[in-house]
């Protein structure tokens, strides 16, 4: 018998993403079986990139409004503004093509070679999304526009170019609180990509 048997599904919401209630039977390590009810939020997979300038020791980040952050009572980011790496959802495209599209829209940069760093689940207890994380070196010559996001999607994105050490200090102080951003900043630091 398979370790998981889906017994029933019920779509609770299907707007920007799909929220489905699942009833399933699961085989535990001791061989016993138990019925569980969970909800899973499916909005597809995403991509994120941290550009770093080896010559100047800087990274490119974005600041934008995030409604869930605004709605979380007591959060230090009460205005809903979050500092993050450039990221977005995949539109049924190759992850590298997707992050290149996002970088051009949000940052206004077109990168040369990019490196896939990790695949990671950000909130696997309730969200199916897997985020493919990238890094890329950049220079001022890679800038092709002012960026800022897609106006037809309502994006109003501020681009931040800061030294890596300042970004890491912001992680420690809680100014940067986004998991994918923290992962990529630590990757750049630990790999010695900026000195």
Image (tube, grey):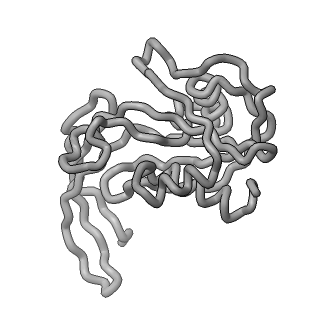
Residue 141, quarter of picture: top right
Residue 2, quarter of picture: bottom left
User: As drawn, which residue projects farthest toward the top?
Assistant: 152
* Quadrant containing the C terminus in the rendered view: bottom right
Q: Is residue 88 above or below residue 141?
A: below
| Residue in the foreground of this view, choosing between 145 and 31 | 145
- x%, y% of residue 83? 46, 41
Q: Is residue 35 above or below residue 107?
A: below
Question: In the figure, is residue 129 to the left or right of 134?
Answer: left
- x%, y% of residue 125? 32, 59
Q: Is residue 16 above or below residue 194?
A: above
* Quadrant containing the N terminus in the rendered view: bottom left
Question: In the figure, is residue 50 to the left or right of 67?
Answer: right
Question: In the figure, is residue 131 to the left or right of 101?
Answer: left
Name the residue rendered at 20%, 64% in the picture.
36
| Residue in the foreground of this view, choosing between 129 and 184 | 184
- x%, y% of residue 173? 42, 57
User: As drawn, which residue projects farthest toward the bottom?
Assistant: 30
Question: In the figure, is residue 82 to the left or right of 35?
Answer: right
């Amino acid at each position: 018998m398979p370790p998981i048997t889906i017994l029933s599904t019920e779509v609770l919401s299907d707007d920007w993403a799909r929220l489905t209630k699942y009833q399933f039977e699961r085989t535990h390590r001791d061989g016993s079986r138990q019925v569980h009810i969970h909800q899973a939020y499916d909005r597809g997979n995403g991509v994120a990139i941290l550009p770093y300038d080896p010559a100047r020791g800087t990274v490119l980040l974005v600041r934008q409004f995030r409604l869930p952050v605004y709605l979380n009572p007591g959060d230090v980011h009460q205005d809903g503004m979050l500092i993050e790496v450039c990221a977005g959802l995949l539109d049924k495209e190759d992850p590298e093509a997707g992050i290149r599209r996002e970088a051009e829209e949000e940052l206004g940069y077109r990168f040369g070679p990019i490196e896939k760093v990790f695949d990671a689940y950000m909130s696997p207890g309730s969200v199916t999304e897997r985020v493919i994380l990238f890094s890329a070196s950049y220079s001022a010559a890679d800038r092709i526009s002012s960026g800022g996001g897609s106006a037809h999607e309502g994006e109003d994105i501020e681009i931040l170019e800061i030294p890596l050490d300042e970004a890491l200090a912001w992680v420690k102080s809680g100014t940067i609180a986004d998991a994918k951003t923290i992962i990529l900043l630590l990757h750049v630091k630990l790999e010695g990509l900026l000195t």
